[in-house]
């Protein structure tokens, strides 16, 4: 039984959009290795959260907010790590093009 409250629907939409982004990266990007590794991590924590969503015991006594928080934190943490890594790679590429720039 998946919860269908508005908050959970928003969480499911974010999971789906992140899946579309990662699959699109695997198909279209030049650096497919990064997207494949991110897709593997995504599938692992989506499986973990699916087991949490389907267990009714997690939703007793107001536990639905904790489940919603955990599910949202996985997505936000994954997005932050991905964006930080992309920014770091972008800075390193720019530094490699500019010989006078030194990254310490």
Image: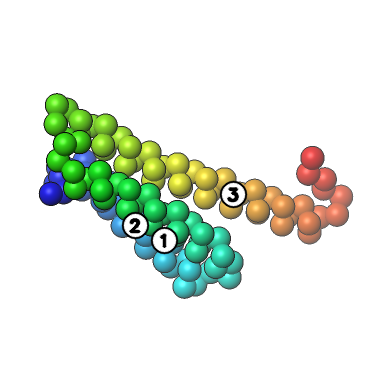
Residue lying at 30% horizontally and 46% vertically, measured from the top left? 49
How many residues crowd mark 3 within 10 Å: few (<14), some (14–19), many (20+)?
few
**Tag 1 residue:** 21
How many residues crowd mark 2 within 10 Å: few (<14), some (14–19), many (20+)?
few
Query: Which percent across, then down, holds residue 50?
Result: 26, 50
Query: Which percent across, then down, holds residue 33?
Result: 56, 65
How many residues crowd mark 1 within 10 Å: few (<14), some (14–19), many (20+)?
some
* Quadrant in the picture for residue 31: bottom right
Query: Which percent across, then down, holds residue 78?
Result: 45, 47
Question: In this image, 47 relative to 53: left or right?
Answer: right
Residue lying at 39% horizontally and 43% vertically, measured from the top left? 74
State the separation of the CA atoms marked 3 and 1.
Answer: 16 Å
Mark earlier in primary sequence (3, 1): 1
Are circles 1 and 2 on residues that touch, CB within 8 Å? Answer: yes
Residue lying at 34% horizontally and 52% vertically, measured from the top left? 46
State the separation of the CA atoms marked 2 and 3.
Answer: 19 Å
Label disc, if present, on residue 101 of the rendered structure:
none
**Tag 2 residue:** 17
* Quadrant in the picture for residue 73: top left
Helix, strand or loop status at disc 3: helix
Helix, strand or loop status at disc 2: helix
**Tag 3 residue:** 85
Furthest residue toward bottom: 27
Mark earlier in primary sequence (2, 3): 2
- Tell me, yes or no, if residue 10 can be seen here: no
Residue lying at 16% horizontally and 49% vertically, measured from the top left? 2
- Tell me, yes or no, if residue 83 can be seen here: yes
Above or below residue 18? Residue 33 is below
């Amino acid at each position: 039984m998946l919860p269908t409250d508005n908050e959970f629907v928003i969480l499911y939409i974010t999971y789906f959009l992140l899946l579309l982004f990662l699959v699109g990266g695997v198909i279209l990007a030049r650096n497919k290795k990064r997207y494949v590794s991110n897709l593997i991590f995504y599938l692992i924590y989506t499986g973990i959260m699916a087991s949490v969503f389907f267990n009714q015991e997690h939703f007793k006594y107001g536990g639905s907010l904790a489940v919603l928080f955990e599910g949202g934190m996985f997505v936000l943490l994954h997005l932050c790590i991905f964006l930080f890594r992309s920014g770091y790679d972008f800075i390193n590429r720019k530094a490699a093009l500019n010989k006078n720039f030194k990254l310490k």
